[in-house]
Amino acid sequence: MAYNAAMNKILAKALFSRVRHSVLSVLFSSPEISLHLREIARLTNFSAATVRLELDSLTAAGILTDERKGNQRFFLANRQCPVFDELCSIVKKTSAIANRGLLEEMSLKYIWWLSPKEASYSPFRVLAQVMNIGTFEDVYKISTAFGDTSLKDVITHAQPGQFDKKSWSYWHYRLGLADTENTPPLPVRTFA
């Protein structure tokens, strides 16, 4: 049987509850980022109490780690978990169905001069625009959905004018492409 977007959704539903899949998607799509309970609840659209139960269960199983900072508890994907790589892969495969819809959603906000459908055919353009001027929530959505590898492709193939200096430096640092002192110069337009 060939797997398509609809089958990915059915597979995710068969393997995990909606809450568990949402929590795992948030934390395993960007495993280097730690988030506190309220951030995870906001990103998954579930109540904090529901998310807390899931986080406690996943932490007890060793799938997540937690750390207290002041009176907040931060959660992070546990890289020492024996099924870490498999969970990252499952999350990537079962969350991919939302990418086209997400691109259209982001293009409504950030590529307003094209129809959402037209803009979604140029994913690098949409992603670059969100990376440059997007809100924290929108940047997190694209980071989660597309992963750092895709964002690295966007920044390394950026066209002149797609990034301002501050965003250019931030993304090079955030994606591990350069430290703050050695950011490469912005792409420049050349006239033949």
Image: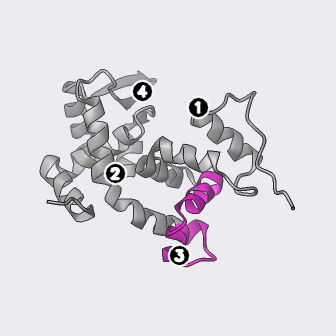
Q: Which residue is mark 3?
A: 118
Which image quadrant: the C terminus? bottom right
Residues tagged 4 and 3 counted as in contact (Cβ below 8 A): no
Label 3 to label 1: alpha-carbon separation: 31 Å
Quick one: label 4 or label 3, which is nearer the N terminus?
Answer: 4
Label 1 to label 4: alpha-carbon separation: 30 Å
Q: Residue at coordinates 30% horizontally, 41% vertically from top-left?
A: 89
Q: What is the chief secondary structure element of the magenta stretch?
A: helix
The percent position of residue 158, horizontal first and vertical second, equals: 66, 52
Q: Which residue is mark 4?
A: 71
Q: Which residue is mark 1?
A: 176
Label 4 to label 3: alpha-carbon separation: 46 Å
The percent position of residue 82, horizontal first and vertical second, equals: 23, 24
Query: In this figure, which colouring scheme has been used for the structure?
Result: one colour
Quick one: label 2 or label 1, which is nearer the N terminus?
Answer: 2
Quick one: label 4 or label 2, which is nearer the N terminus?
Answer: 2
Q: Residue at coordinates 41% horizontally, 65% vertically from top-left?
A: 100
Quick one: label 1 or label 4, which is nearer the N terminus?
Answer: 4
